[in-house]
Amino acid sequence: MAKRKLLCVLRHILRIDLKKLILALATCGVVLSLLNTLFASYQVHKEAFIKDTLHANQTYATKLAEVTQLFLQSVNSQLNVSAFHIAENIDDTSLVNAELERLLSQTNSFDSLVVASADGQIIAVRPELPVLGQSISSQQLHKVMLQKPVVLDPFVSPAGNLMISPTYPLFDGQGQYLGFVAGGIYLHGDTILNRLLGRHHYADGSYSYVVDKAHRILYHPDPDRIGEQVSNNVVIDRVLNGQTGAMELVNSSDKHMIAGFAAIPMTGWGVVSQRPLISILNQLAITHRSVVYSSVPFTIVILGWVFVVGFLIARPLTVLAKQLTVVENKNVSGAGVSAWYYEVANLKCALLQSHRAVRQVIRALDADRKTDKLTALHNRLSLDLWLENTIKFKVGFSVLAIDIDHFKSINDSHGHCTGDKVLKELAKLMIQNARADDFCCRVGGEEFLIFMPNESLSQAMITAERLRTLISNHIMPNGIRVTVSIGVSQWPNNSMQIDKVIEMADKALYQAKQSGRNKSCCLEAA
């Protein structure tokens, strides 16, 4: 008897009825929607994180390459001045040494300086090193015999230092080649080159390094790797071919990296800035946990509401089902069935509201990733989507490429906070003076683009001049006045690629910069 009662209880608990089906279905719907939203959010954020890191590393590598190029040009100018004085006094060792001492004390660019005769023999050195009277290698002599400024490939000096050496030729008054002056820049230790390049090294494993044409590492945060030759690295192969870009790769240490790279034209060296993929995924995991923690309370509230509503929906039908089990019951009414359809309609409405709330969260996340956080303008991702629609519907447009003149001096003089205020104010001026269907975006730093659908090139130039004049007369935060240079081009809805139009706008902007800034220039499609 007891066993039979236990079986009845178990059957009652395990019995599939309408209430359980509704609650199970509603619960599954909410949970699966949440999981789908979280998965989609994770994928979107992952793609955005990687894309932003690729762009940031490429930009940083380019900046490092430019800084190194400027440093080497500065070194070349210093040697040029000294070469003139040394050539005049080549036969007076004391005056030559005095000039070398002057150059060493004037700048911290060099670790050592030497003067060599036309046949490569060292005739003066500062500071004093045991190399006087020795000759440079035939390979180095062959390079300096070109009688023009060159940067010698890394080598181990007679004093035992791994170094690079910018050189400058010496000529007398009649143009006769006398030899050369060379500056030594050490690659090991606390040197000027290491201090110049060693500012990008973070706890997450990000770092930069420099390689020469022989795939040899000239700078690396790990001093033991300086001088090492690296092979089977596609990024190094590309940057030494003069390319600039960014990509994902597995490096020589079998680590998945996000790398940006840029070449140094003066020497043929390459700069690589990279970040481990695992650090990006760790950061993404932290962000995604915040999304999950924010979603859980709301999901719990929804589930509680679904259980209550589900019970209310199932209750009339449950009563009706119980009544139907008793054949003799003459009080069976169809009113319960009618109520069942009404409640189902309300449940459907509630579920639709739930999905609508989830879609709003997705739209908010999508809008956030398409918007520049500083200026509230569109960003590059939003620009790509807009251009896709423009190509699809073949809508002609004019484009304005805008760049703030001497923006770096504002950051240097007033601080980055003021610089950010200037960027925000400029964005407001752009939006206030744009048409309703114009597309304003920030593409990086102080660079902006305005796309003007169905606008002629001549009218776009008028708009550019009006905007340029407005900005130059506008008082920015902290009383700052700025000017902009604007390049204008047009996509006339023909076979010309849109990338070429934007490139033409950049070229026109470059012309405006070269011709004195605070100007508008245009290039028209052929």
Image (tube, rainbow, N blue to C red):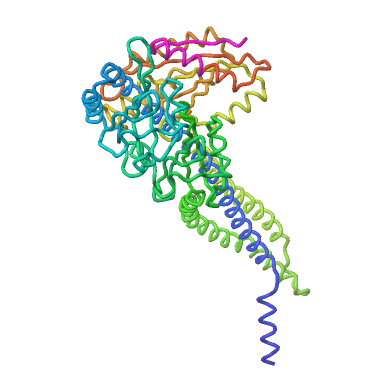
Query: Residue at horizontal 59%, vertical 55%?
Result: 35
Q: Position of residue 219 (x, y in %)?
A: 41, 41
- Asked whether the viewer can see residue 372, the reply is no
474 vs 154: above or below = above
Query: Residue at horizontal 26%, vertical 33%?
Result: 126
324 vs 161: above or below = below
Q: Position of residue 451 (x, y in %)?
A: 53, 20
The answer to if 447 sits in the magenta stretch is no
The stretch of residues the image draws in magenta is 506-526
Query: Residue at horizontal 43%, vertical 34%?
Result: 137
Between 341 and 382, the residue placed more toward the observer is 382
433 vs 334: above or below = above
Q: Position of residue 525 (x, y in %)?
A: 60, 11
- Asked whether the viewer can see residue 106, the reply is yes
Residue farthest along the right direction in this orientation: 327
Quadrant of the drawing holding the N terminus:
bottom right
In the picture, measured across the screen, residue 280 lies left or right of residue 314, that is left
Residue farthest along the bottom direction in this orientation: 1
Quarter of the image where one finds residue 374: top left
Between 409 and 373, the residue placed more toward the observer is 409
Q: Position of residue 355 (x, y in %)?
A: 59, 48
Query: Residue at horizontal 35%, vertical 21%?
Result: 406
Quadrant of the drawing holding the C terminus:
top right
396 vs 272: above or below = above
The answer to if 524 sits in the magenta stretch is yes
Tally the marks: 0
In the picture, measured across the screen, residue 475 lies left or right of residue 163, that is left
